[in-house]
Image (spheres, helix red, strand yellow):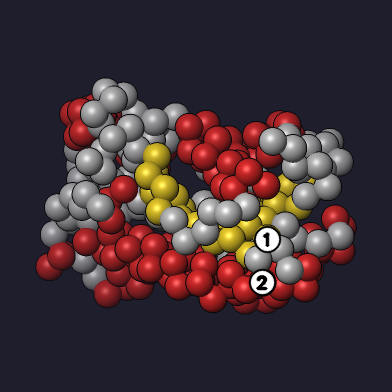
Amino acid sequence: MTFKDKTIIVTGAGGGMGKATVDLLLKAGANVVGCDLNTDALLEFEGKDNLMTCQGNLLEESTVQQIFKDAAERFGGIDGLANIAGIAQSATPIDEVSLSEFHKIMDINLTMTFLTCREASKYMKERIQGKIVNIGSVSTTRPRPGLQSYVASKGAVESFTKALALELAPDHINVNVLHPGPANTNMLGEFVKKGSDVEDGKKEIFERSVPLGKLLQPTDIASSIKFLLSDEANMITGIVLHVDGGRSI
């Protein structure tokens, strides 16, 4: 599974799943463009000629456009996009969720995905090829109380992905959504109800919900993202891939 001469943009590259994905793609020979509000986690890869880091707000159209332009100019084109950037919701009853909180969750999880997919499609259509992987959530299949806004945002990502897969199929652009289960990342603790013990919550609420009996590791998700971005997935588009240790059953 080689990615030599392929350029992949990874959003949320500074988080656990994002960093693991950047690492695997770099090792596979890809040119990787790691994007996030904070890219300090990528400093350990500093000095690699096939890595470009971009720090900025991907909810700004001009920022998204500039990142794709710079990446295409440096590496010669855009072959893949992994939309890993996202925000969690601490378990909160709907009557306590403000409109601004709802909009923030929808913007970061959905609007950002729209902006990066829209920009990626422009470059991929020029070459009549490309791969896009959007990260959803197992919660769209197995919701938990208090996560209504988060679930809505990720459910929208799934529907958006399927619609885009059909739309871009004539241009030979594959678009798929991956629903991770509970993963051992900092973000998982953000789903715990405010005031609760984070580590206890991870174990009692999330780890026990996984039939395979343990939390996923970032590399479990990264490996599947890598597969969906590879040539081995050339005839896979519009699918929902659950990587969740059986949580969606």
Q: Residue at x 78, y 68 (%)?
A: 127
Label 1 is placed on what type of residue? Gly
Point out residue 49 in the picture as x, y percentages from the top left corner.
86, 41
Point out residue 215 in the picture as x, y percentages from the top left corner.
34, 28
Q: Is residue 104 above or below residue 28?
A: below
Q: Residue at x 73, y 47 (%)?
A: 32
Q: Residue under label 1, please give it.
A: 130
Label 2 is placed on what type of residue? Asp
Q: Nearer the viewer, residue 101 or 232?
A: 232
Whether label 2 touches label 1, CB < 8 Å: yes
Tag of residue 171: 2
Point out residue 168 in the picture as x, y percentages from the top left corner.
59, 72
Disc 2 on helix, strand or loop?
Answer: helix
Q: Residue at x 24, y 29 (%)?
A: 211
Q: Nearer the viewer, residue 105 or 74?
A: 74
**Residue most extreme to the front:** 235
Answer few, some or many: residues within 10 Å of disc 2's Cα (few below 14, many 20 plus, some between 14 and 19).
some
Q: Nearer the viewer, residue 81 or 3?
A: 3
Quadrant in which the N terminus appears: top right
Q: Is residue 176 above or below residue 166?
A: above
Q: Residue at x 45, y 73 (%)?
A: 163
Disc 1 on helix, strand or loop?
Answer: strand
Q: Quadrant of residue 207?
A: top left
